[in-house]
Image: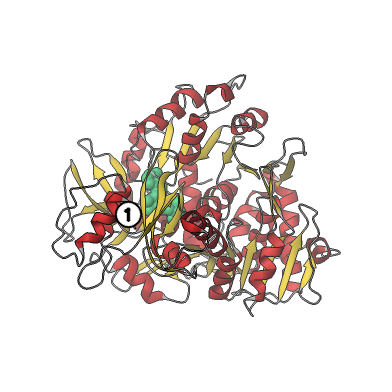
Amino acid sequence: MVPRVSTLGGYIFEYQKSVTNPTGFWAHVADSFFWRKKWDNLLNWDFEKAEIKWFEGAKLNITENIFERHQFYRANQKAIIWEPNDPSEATRELTYQQLFDEVKRFSNALLKAGVKKGEVVGIYLPMVPELVVAMLACARIGAIHSIVFAGFSAQSLSDRLIDAGASLLITADGGFRGNKITPLKAIADEAMDNCNCVKTAVVLKRTGETIQMKAGRDIWWDDFVAGVSTDHEAELMDAEDPLFVLYTSGSTGKPKGLVHTVAGFMVFTAYTFRNVFQYGDGDVYFCSADIGWVTGHSYLVYGPLLNGATSLMFEGIPTFPDAGRYWEIIDKHQVNQFYTAPTAIRSLMAMGMEWLDGKRLKSLKVLGTVGEPINEEAWHWYHDHIGKNRCPVVDTWWQTETGGIMISPLAGITPTKPSYATMPLMGIQPVIVDQDGKELTGNSVEGNLCIKYPWPGIARTIWGDHERFRQTYFSTYKNMYFSGDGVKRDEDGYYRILGRVDDVINVSGHRLGSAEIENAINEHPLISESAVVGFPHDIKGQGIYAYVVCTNFSTGGEEGIRQSVLLTVSKIIGSFAKPDKIQLVSGLPKTRSGKIMRRILRKIAEGNTSDFGDTTTLLDPEVVEEIVQGKI
Ligand code: WTA
């Protein structure tokens, strides 16, 4: 088993060890895994060049560490409990043996279809167990999975498939979410029409609606695996071979395909899962994230399954059929650890206490949050009413780039403080720097959050663009990874994440770049220019505020333009990226050199109508006046 710390003294001791002798520390953690060949060199790194390698020379397969490693004593234990969108549909459960057989069968089917080691496979599926089967089968044969959240539009899907060069796509006829059906295959058809790379599409039947199957390209999942053997020997992978590509938004440009590699990701997610959640044998763990985002990758699938855990997977949404759904699932499956986003907590809190009536929630031992800062009120509601004052809340800070949790309490061990992610995990060396890159030492300081030493789970590159990887994360501050987040270290040395300091907007825990939304809006034929900023939102954490310059709104009037801008964003990115507010303006505040002064737009979006700081570089101050007064 992966080593687990169980006391505060143990944490302090292990943390010290991990900082004074990082390689010795990680070698010890890695010893608990199953390697076909051990590493020659534990760590090789150069932050200047953005080159990081862990466990070089080692040979392994991550799925052997999930299945073969646990086979003899976990074969009949539940690996996945699946709760459907509609509570009247039956729950599905897969034991480790059943999941193993499905993964091996699908591995053979992928090989039969000609998928080779190192090739990228796109996955665009709803939250069903076949999604886990598909990703683990990729990992087993050495193909690189690139999962696209099933809320993304056809254009976003095709952009990602093209960038990754995916040769095969695994999708479904449709997906259920609340009382809606998403026509996934129709969206995938449109995406595939836009890219030449996808030659085969495997289609899972889920909703049963009528779809088009293109001869020579599309094949039903059941036909794809029919008659295929469940005997399969895992492909031998190098430690630094890519495991997956996952796209995420940054400040500028198009979304980046972050690449994570096999061994480091495995060791880091397994270790952090066990320690943060204090998972014990027999526990039922429920992570409500979608596998389309990194939380689902690391803490619904890989981290838990590498520990032989029982991971609960939920297809639906927290408010269907009513706002008591999460609590009902927790009681029904006797969930012990529950991990969700602050947005979900805030929206359920706003629905009132009646949804907790009759819910016992007695099985719960640990509560977790991720994805955005949690405000004190939501923290207390979660702690008092869901955790009944007896479950520790772990506020876990991390990112797609970090692969796993970086700063977080260890459940029941680290004393918590509402809205604080508290202390760094073992092996993580955070530093706070000021604008000039000077390290701010000691307590009671605030600045930008960087990490000064590598950890096994750090992303290795951006797919197809290593220079962008170096530039984005390693060029702002010398010899440090820059997270893009602001942070405070208080008088006790506790860390509190303050939110992004760049143009990334975190809407309901979904990460979006302002440039990405602006580009989508600018596709609208009547919009010449736009600027998007985040603003504080009671439920979503941040909302999206769009200032748009419209060239002609005689057709449909202002309201018509707003509606069609929303439609454009849904079509180009997905409906989760729709702006909450759209203000039509005649121009944007720009500096003489043509740069949009977002600082001013952010202030106005927050409801601040004066006090814009230094505006001497502003080209046309009247524009600001107009925007404040809501005049076009
Ligand atoms: C934010 C999600 C405050 C942060 C795992 C980060 C958080 C971004 C927390 C990454 C937290 C994540 N408290 N903010 N506990 N966790 N964030 O890549 O701004 O989707 O940079 O990864 O979410 O989002 P991503």
Picture layout, residue 391 above or below residue 91: above
What is the quadrant of residue 457 in the picture? bottom left
Q: Where is residue 275? Give x, y as percent.
A: 45, 41
Q: Is residue 33 visible?
A: no
Crowd class of label 1 (few under 14; some 14 to 19; many from 20; radius 10 Å)? few
Picture layout, residue 379 above or below residue 428: above
Q: Nearer the viewer, residue 480 or 160?
A: 160
Q: Nearer the viewer, residue 137 or 384?
A: 384
Q: Is residue 372 visible?
A: yes
Report the residue that reaches farthest toward the right.
Answer: 227
Report the residue that reaches farthest toward the top.
Answer: 358
Residue 487 is left or right of residue 132, and the answer is left
Q: Where is residue 523? Give x, y as percent.
A: 49, 70
Quadrant location, the N terminus:
top right
Residue bearing mark 1: 631
Query: Disc 1 on helix, strand or loop?
Result: loop
Quadrant location, the C terminus:
bottom left
What is the quadrant of residue 215 in the picture? bottom right
Identity of the amino acid at label 1? Lys
Q: Residue at x 62, y 76 (%)?
A: 194
Q: Where is residue 520? Give x, y as percent.
A: 48, 66
What is the quadrant of residue 167 in the picture? bottom right
Q: Nearer the viewer, residue 211 or 52?
A: 211
| Ligand 1 within 8 Å, label 1 CB | no
Q: Report the number of numbered marks.
A: 1
The colour scheme of the drawn protein is secondary structure
Q: Where is residue 146? Give x, y as percent.
A: 58, 65
Report the residue that reaches farthest toward the bottom.
Answer: 196
Residue 23 is left or right of residue 304, and the answer is left
Residue 551 is left or right of residue 424, and the answer is right
Picture layout, residue 214 above or below residue 354: below
